[in-house]
Image (cartoon, helix red, strand yellow):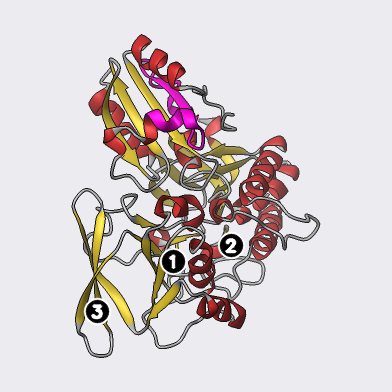
């Protein structure tokens, strides 16, 4: 199962491992089709043409495969959707919980994945 | 610069803004909808809409998505997640400057910026957002399976969601600032009959505490001004909405509740500037009333532009 967004979808933990190991900079938003998640998908969709050095993708929160994100230590204190992960060279460099604005997302992208 | 000029720019992409966009673009008006969030507005907060005439039952997201598709299919352009840097509503040719996109002009504006969840504005609230504090029960309720939580508020949404959250939580404590509720009787009866729900009346949360996540709140009794502390896993803040009108505060006439004052034809005090939806002063805030406002504002803007030419 995947989300109904325009973003590339990650369906399995194996897909995610492959994505983050084959690409230097990756942003993955793990959520549902809810009011806190939809704005983040929209922001990522809009930024995907601007940040060509970053791979953007989403993952459905309610799948056993998403345990790779749900159970990540960086998300231990999270209790608000979506869980948004930023990976550099396969490692998590930032994770956020709940809705984020365009400014918050671009600030992280510029800080962690400087062009 | 020509393609940066529109007949009408609509601020807000909720039910009111999208409806105005549908009517304007269908009337061949060059229309831009500027949205600070995602299209759909408050509609997407609603899991199920069962009282929208002509539609038996649908998800709020689906209804918003259909409205957006209707507006774009008739030619309206939509910018989502756009931060407004400056706004000139009073000149004959009006303008808006957006971060990352630049400046756009128009002959008329429709203000349909809606509202947002009202925060408590107490220490710790920002710090624990998403780490125990939530404004959306349908989004985050299942993070509190077998936990103890607080619902802040005493209106329809607060009591309805308090009942709904008992599906997950062991115990739900409703904290409300008054000695009575503002909800409809059946919401009150259902909450009071639920064994998992307790009530702390005439009280407000004064502070949130925790380390990585929320663990405790300080509660003030509004009558005695005594403080107590309570260990808690989560807090849902459901104390209504505030209109998104800060941007127009010194420009457009507002009520003391910061709602835009509009005529029956949705005109504001500024020529060529109309308003619609939850950001306006009105008694009932429903998708249907927002759609009605958007229709009137759209048609009034068409008439305004026709008379101007």
Please tell me how crowded label 3 is: few (under 14), some (14-19), or many (20+) other residues with Cα within 10 Å: some
Mark 2 / mark 3, whichever is N-terminal: 3
Mark 3 / mark 1, whichever is N-terminal: 3
**Pointer 3 chain:** B
SS at mark 1?
loop
Q: Residue at label 2?
A: B277
* Of the two numbered discs 2 and 3 in the rendering, the one whose residue sits closer to the viewer: 3
* Alpha-carbon span between mark 2 and mark 1: 20 Å
Q: Tell whether label 1 touches label 2 (CB within 8 Å).
A: no
Q: Which residues are magenta?
A: A43-68
* Residue A76 locus on image (x, y percent): 29, 41
Q: Is residue B266 above or below residue A51?
A: below
SS at mark 3?
strand
Q: Residue at label 1?
A: B238
Q: Residue at label 3?
A: B220
Viewer-proximal residue among B187 and B309: B187
Q: Residue at x 42, y 60 (%)?
A: B248
SS at mark 2?
helix
> Which residue is outermost to the right?
B54
* Alpha-carbon span between mark 3 and mark 1: 18 Å
The answer to whether residue A45 is magenta is yes
Is residue B70 toward the left or the right of residue B145 in the image? right
Q: Residue at x 34, y 85 (%)?
A: B202
Please tell me how crowded label 2 is: few (under 14), some (14-19), or many (20+) other residues with Cα within 10 Å: many
Q: Is residue B95 above or below residue B51?
A: above
**Pointer 2 chain:** B
Q: Residue at x 31, y 38 (%)?
A: A75
Same chain for mark 2 and mark 3? The answer is yes
* Residue B159 locus on image (x, y percent): 50, 72
| Residue B99 shows in the view | no
Q: Is residue A67 above or below residue B47?
A: above
Q: Tell whether label 3 touches label 2 (CB within 8 Å).
A: no
């Amino acid at each position: 199962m995947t989300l109904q967004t325009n973003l590339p979808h990650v369906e399995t933990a194996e897909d995610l491992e492959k994505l983050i190991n084959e690409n230097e900079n990756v942003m993955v938003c793990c959520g549902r089709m809810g009011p806190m998640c939809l704005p983040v998908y929209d922001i990522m969709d809009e930024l995907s043409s601007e940040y060509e050095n970053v791979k953007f993708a989403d993952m459905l929160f309610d799948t056993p495969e998403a345990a790779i994100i749900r159970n990540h230590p960086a998300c231990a204190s999270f209790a608000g959707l979506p869980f948004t992960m930023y990976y550099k060279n396969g490692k998590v460099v930032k994770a956020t919980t709940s809705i984020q604005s365009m400014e918050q997302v671009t600030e992280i992208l510029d800080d962690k994945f400087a062009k | 610069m020509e393609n940066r000029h529109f007949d009408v720019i609509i601020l807000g992409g909720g039910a009111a803004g999208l409806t105005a966009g549908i009517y304007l673009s269908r009337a061949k008006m060059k229309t831009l909808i500027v949205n600070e969030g995602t299209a759909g507005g408050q509609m997407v907060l609603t899991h199920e809409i069962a009282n929208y005439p002509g539609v038996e039952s649908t998800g709020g997201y689906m209804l918003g998505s259909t409205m957006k598709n209707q507006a774009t299919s008739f030619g309206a352009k939509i910018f989502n997640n756009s931060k407004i840097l400056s706004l000139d509503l009073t000149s004959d040719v009006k303008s808006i400057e957006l971060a990352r996109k630049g400046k756009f002009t128009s002959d008329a504006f429709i203000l349909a910026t809606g509202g947002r969840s009202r925060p408590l504005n107490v220490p710790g609230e920002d710090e624990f957002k998403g780490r125990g504090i939530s404004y959306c029960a349908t989004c985050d309720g299942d993070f509190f399976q077998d936990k103890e939580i607080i619902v802040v508020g005493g209106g329809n949404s607060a009591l309805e969601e308090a009942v709904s959250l008992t599906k997950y939580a062991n115990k739900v404590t409703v904290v409300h600032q008054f000695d009575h509720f503002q909800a409809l009787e059946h919401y009150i009866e259902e909450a009071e009959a639920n064994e998992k729900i307790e009530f702390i009346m005439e009280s407000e949360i004064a502070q949130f505490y925790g380390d990585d996540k929320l663990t405790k709140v300080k509660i003030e009794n509004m009558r005695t001004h005594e403080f107590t502390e309570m260990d808690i896993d989560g807090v849902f803040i459901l104390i209504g909405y505030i209109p998104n009108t800060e941007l127009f505060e010194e420009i457009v006439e507002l009520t003391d509740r910061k709602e835009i004052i509009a005529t029956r034809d949705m005109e504001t005090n500024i020529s060529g500037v109309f308003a619609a939806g939850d950001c306006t002063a009105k008694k009932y805030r429903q998708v249907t009333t927002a759609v009605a406002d958007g229709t009137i504002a759209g048609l009034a803007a068409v008439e305004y532009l026709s008379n101007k030419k």
